Amino acid sequence: MAKVKSKYVCQNCGYESAGYLGKCPDCGSWSSFVEELSENSSDKIVLNIPDNTPPMTLSEIEMNSEIRVKTNISEFDRVLGGGIVQGSLVLIAGDPGIGKSTILLQAGGALCNDGKTILYVSAEESAGQVKLRAERLGVKSDHLYIYPQTNFELIRKHIEEMKPDLVIVDSIQAIYTNTIQSSAGSVSQIRECCNSLMGIAKTNNISIIVIGHVTKEGNIAGPKVLEHMVDTVIQFEGDKYKSYRILRSVKNRFGNTSEVGIFEMGAKGLVEIVNPSQAFLKEYNQTQTPGSTIIVTNEGTRPLLVEVQALVGATPYPAPRRVANGVDLSRVLQILAVLEKRIGLNLSKQDVYVNVIGGIDVNEPAGDLGIALAIITCVRDVVFDPQTAIVGEIGLSGEIRGVNHIDKRITEAEKLGFKKIIIPEANEIQEKNKKIEVIKVKRIIEAITKAGGK
Ligand code: TYD
Ligand code: MG
């Protein structure tokens, strides 16, 4: 007889304790402990994985190159590292309503057209709802099986009977296994279901994609452990209220991380954006206002041109406000400190707002100089040359530091018709014969004078 015990589990990181704790000693989150019931561990069900791989030396291992299945949605394949690796477990995480179900139904539909069999486990929506969406997306196929089910044991039975090429589980938070008594969505349930799905993927060599919601703190809901367990984690980002969506690979055992794919949500689902820089700059070319610059950021292996806007004005508040959207606030604060100290810009009584257009997050310091010039041109009320793109990291003494992938960035700016690009002096350019004029700068002051933003 299994003995039922109770334990308290942190819903953020999965830390277990015999009694209730106010603060998690592992991840530091407060009030995150929830009581869960567990079977005695000695009665735990062991995965039935055959022991057919004895320990071996590297030279004994036969190399079978991974088999990748392409979804033919090229931006999705690119993020996966060139398609879904057979037998892998992929997690797609993102806020509710961002488009996770949509992209996977589209990918499922595209794969079916290639003669693959897909099992779409819909644990959140009825079969009718999925059909409605499929009709909207124009997905039709006799090889796409929709299975509205939340019970893991039944899902496993159908996967093992049907042996599809790909299983989509929408979502991991909505399914539960009978072997654990806590409710669906709890850390123990998520962990157990995910673990078992990993077992199914590896033993049957079936690819499985699971959808996971993100908590309001930005963690992949349920526990961080989910991230550790799967082969690949793909984050779906972007503003729910704007149309751009960005797929970003944050972990990939079979490919490059921080690779991005860019989509736009339309009336017929997600459409790939083949030339994202052009899309991001669409409005820039129409409105040229003071406080707006173009930076070349690097996302994964791909350079992207995005517009940065700054607004600086006298503050009506006792303490001036600093707001950053699409860029790290601490980065902006550092840039402001350098501008005050090194070029004497007095911002102590000014509110500063910095915004990156297009819903993309600029997470690298190469955007510093562009942000600084946006702030400076706004303070001085001049329009920055719209034909000049900007790249460079700002050091604390006001020096401009070199950035990586400089050639790719220059080529992208040239491709989009920019006449000039400001880059750090320290960067060596390998590819010569560029049509675009390259302006090298060492200090912020130089960037202002050389670019004509007086
Ligand atoms: P959905 O894929 O259901 O999000 P998730 O599974 O991540 O929760 O997408 C939901 C949003 O996308 C919803 O607000 C409606 C919108 N949408 C479109 O704009 N066009 C479409 O063709 C579809 C299917 C959805
Ligand atoms: Mg959904």
Image: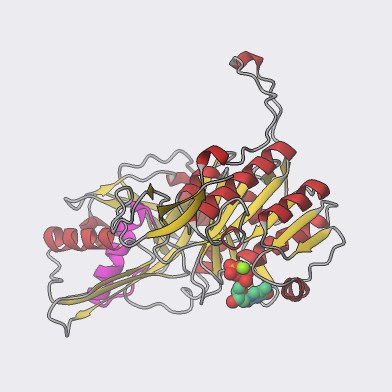
Residue 307 spot, x, y in % from top left: 42, 67
Q: Is residue 66 above or below residue 82?
A: above
Q: Residue at x 22, y 50 (%)?
A: 395
Q: Tell me, yes or no, if residue 219 can be seen here.
A: no
Query: Is residue 374 within the magenta segment?
Result: yes
Q: Give the side of residue 411 with respect to residue 169, left or right.
A: left
Residue 220 spot, x, y in % from top left: 47, 57
Q: Residue at x 54, y 54 (%)?
A: 190
Task: Answer with the quadrant where ligand 2 appears in the image.
Answer: bottom right
Tell me the quadrant of the picture where the N terminus can be found. top right
Question: Which of these two is toward me, 339 or 156?
Answer: 156
Q: Give the side of residue 283 with respect to residue 102, left or right.
A: left
Q: Quadrant of residue 323?
A: bottom left
Query: Is residue 11 within the magenta segment?
Result: no
Residue 431 spot, x, y in % from top left: 48, 41
Q: Quadrant of residue 93?
A: bottom right
Q: Residue at x 29, y 49 (%)?
A: 25
- The residue lying furthest to the front in this view is 1
The segment highlighted magenta reads 363-385
Magenta stretch, main secondary structure class: helix
Residue 229 spot, x, y in % from top left: 53, 43
Tell me the quadrant of the picture where the C terminus can be found. bottom left
Q: Is residue 349 above or below residue 44?
A: below
Q: Tell me, yes or no, if residue 25 can be seen here.
A: yes
Question: Which of these two is toward me, 28 or 349?
Answer: 28
